[in-house]
Amino acid sequence: MNKKHLCVFGLGWGDEGKGKIVDLLGGSFDVVTRFNGGANAGHTIRIGSERFALHLIPTGLIRPGMLGMIGPGVVVDPITLFEEIDQLLERGIDVAGRLVISDRAHLVMPYHKIEDKLHEGAASDKTRIGTTARGIGPCYADKARRSVAVRFCDLLYEDGLPQRISSIVAGKRASFQALFGQHGGLNTEAVLSLLDTARQRLSPFIANTTCWLREQIATGKRVLFEGANGLLLDIDHGTYPFVTSSSTGPHGLAAGSGVSPQTVQRFVGTIKAYSTRVGAGPFVSELTNEMGDAIRKKGHEYGTTTGRPRRCGWFDAVATRYAVNLTGCTDVALMHLDTLGGFDHVGICVSYNIDGEQTNEFPSDPHLLSRAKPVFEYVEGWSDELAGIRRFEDLPSATRDYISRIESLIETPISIASVGADRAETLVHDRFRNILSEMTNA
Ligand code: IMP
């Protein structure tokens, strides 16, 4: 059996530190593949004094020699992509010849972003999702509608694309006018000119990535699949309707990258040592008090994509166990342990109380979930001095107890722990190091 491929994905509501883990593990892999989402994702990596924030380009491409792929399940905003390619080039990182974009991937068009903003602006406080305004939902909706979708292969080969675009834009303008009383500044010439630039700049990157990836695998390359957003934002299994519009877990990997589900053996789920959420929707372990503010301040909990303050709370073991069980997560990377340092005590949400009944199951019904109250357990806090620690066994005993308690609640080993933003500030369990080296030598 092929034992060379691994997936990193988020177990929460996004922002769980996937970028850092993809970057850390990247050295053991040759190819990194994005399979879902779009520029709503924000992956931050810090290497020494350098900080990179990427939204579309697979994070692993920061490593020299690594190959990257944007799969058919991703929705690509060409403007963000140009910006990222240019920003990396300015910092001496050239992705030309190393990045391929699926000819089946859909383009996020200017009208998708306009619709996202107009729709959110017109929504009531109860129905507003709090999207990233990156046009993700409208683009995936057009993908499902088919007739109005634009893919990279259309950009290259569709005769009459300008005529089709003109008619799509006319339809969108009319519908925006009818729904929102304005067309949001949408005009055909600007859209056509953007598509021309996209064709010129991106043609060299567009490929049949299904063949490309199969070839990489057949020639012995090790692939790291990089999930975006997080399992609790999954379109089918997340806290719907307060979710994103793609399949964010390993179940989205096969469809979104074009490989068999049997391709991958190791699934590393990332989650912070506390919980965060940006945007609206239920969040049972949320702390709307000084403790929540203190975690936000200490953890710099402001969105990479939107700059919005994130909602913070204690670690939600009920939601995380649900995410782990659903995805077949084999290893957990527990992030931001250092952020919890320096508090007298640390809480864990061990179960929910719904209408007087205690449960360990994460409700699928949003009405029940919105009535759930957290049942917290408190453990002793630990010192603020974790940054220099490099081995699990050197962590303070209270931190080790916290890790063990979470492992037993979520029934999955914590194989990686992060004690700071830098690549070096990461603890990798010997057990997982051995697994990685087996994969590398397979
Ligand atoms: P959309 O993906 O922009 O449509 O946003 C839908 C919901 O998912 C909103 O609550 C967003 O804040 C949230 N969201 C989407 N992507 C991310 C992410 O990468 N991190 C955190 N939240 C996200």
Image (tube, rainbow, N blue to C red):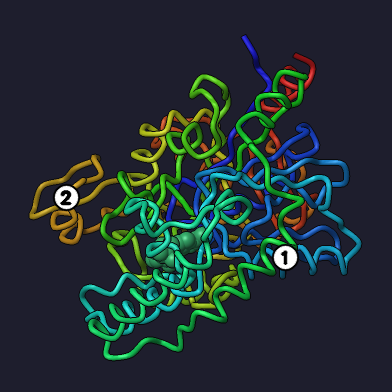
343 or 5, nearer to the observer:
5
Q: Is residue 323 above or below residue 383?
A: above
Helix, strand or loop for disc 2: loop
Q: Residues within 10 Å of mark 2 (few under 14, many from 20)?
A: few
Q: Quadrant of the C terminus?
A: top right
Q: Quadrant of residue 215?
A: top right
* Residue that label 1 marks: 84
Q: CA distance from mark 2 to mark 1?
A: 39 Å
Residue 217 in view in this figure = yes
97 or 408, nearer to the observer:
97
The residue positioned 74% from the left and 44% from the top of the image is 24
425 or 26, nearer to the observer:
26
Inspect the image, locate mark 1, and give the three-letter code of the amino acid beneath it. Answer: Glu
State the mark number for residue 365.
2
In what quadrant does ligand 1 lie? bottom left
Instruction: Determine whether the beta carbon of the residue marked 2 sits less than 8 angstroms from the nearest atom of ligand 1.
Output: no
